Amino acid sequence: MSEEMKIVYKDINDLQMYENNPRKNSDAVQYVANSIQQFGFRNPIIIDKDNTIVCGHTRYKAARRLKMAKVPCIMADDLDEDQIRAFRLADNKVAEMATWDYDRLEQEFALIDPLEFDIADFGFFPNYEPDEDEEEEEEEQASGGLEPSYSLIIDCESKAEQKDVYERLAKMGIIARMA
């Protein structure tokens, strides 16, 4: 293992995608591109000695979409082929293990200036599109000084089903509470 990690900037055309990448990341590319545009390229692509992407295929696709000429990379040239395969899988899998603290997430959302940042640009609430009636109702409430709030109750037959529904909503970026 190398002692010091170095970020190098590579011509994007010199990088190659790993042909057997098991992650389906097309749905995330625009969100990552939005993040790069808003905050800069803060998470380098990890590549092997042959410039093949080990981790960061979505960032690579986002950079291509943004027509970037160079991208920051970290060389994993100290890992052998088996370590690279295992690391590629581990890097993607461990991110799935994290969950949200929804109370804290709501607090963070409340601290973000909605005129400066639209959190939907980063994948929160991706499937939400208000219908015309809902937009009219929000306009009426906004003119009266009231902020709209909506709730949905889902009845489950067991704790296991409740947990399953909660986790599926969380994966979609929907804030939910269990009672």
Image (cartoon, grey):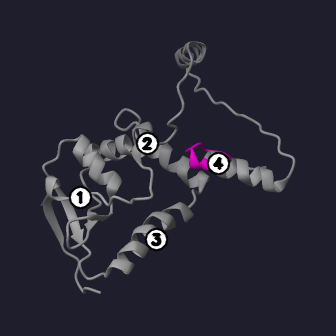
The earlier-in-sequence mark between 3 and 4 is: 3
Q: Determine if the magenta segment contains residue 173.
A: yes
Name the residue beneath numbered marker 2.
27
State which mark lies toward you, 1 or 3: 1
User: Of the residues under marks 1 and 3, which one precedes in the sequence?
Assistant: 1
User: Which residue in the protein does label 4 denote?
Assistant: 168
Q: Which residue is mark 3?
A: 90
Mark 1–mark 4 distance (CA, rounded to whole Å): 33 Å
Whether the residues at callouts 2 and 4 have beta carbons within 8 Å, the answer is: no
Q: Which residue is mark 1?
A: 16
Q: Secondary structure at mark 1?
A: loop
Q: Residues within 10 Å of mark 4 (few under 14, many from 20)?
A: few
**87 on left or right of 144:** left
Task: Tell me what residue is drawn at x 50 percent, y 67 percent.
Answer: 94
- Distance Cα–Cα, label 3 vs label 4: 22 Å
Question: Pointers 1 and 3 in contact (CB under 8 A)?
Answer: no
Q: CA distance from mark 3 to mark 2?
A: 21 Å
Q: What's the residue type where badge 1 is placed?
A: Gln
Q: Nearer the viewer, residue 36 or 51?
A: 51
> What residue type is disc 4 on?
Arg
Three-letter amino acid code of the residue under disc 3: Ala
Q: Are marks 1 and 2 in contact (CB under 8 Å)?
A: no
50 left or right of 34 in image = left
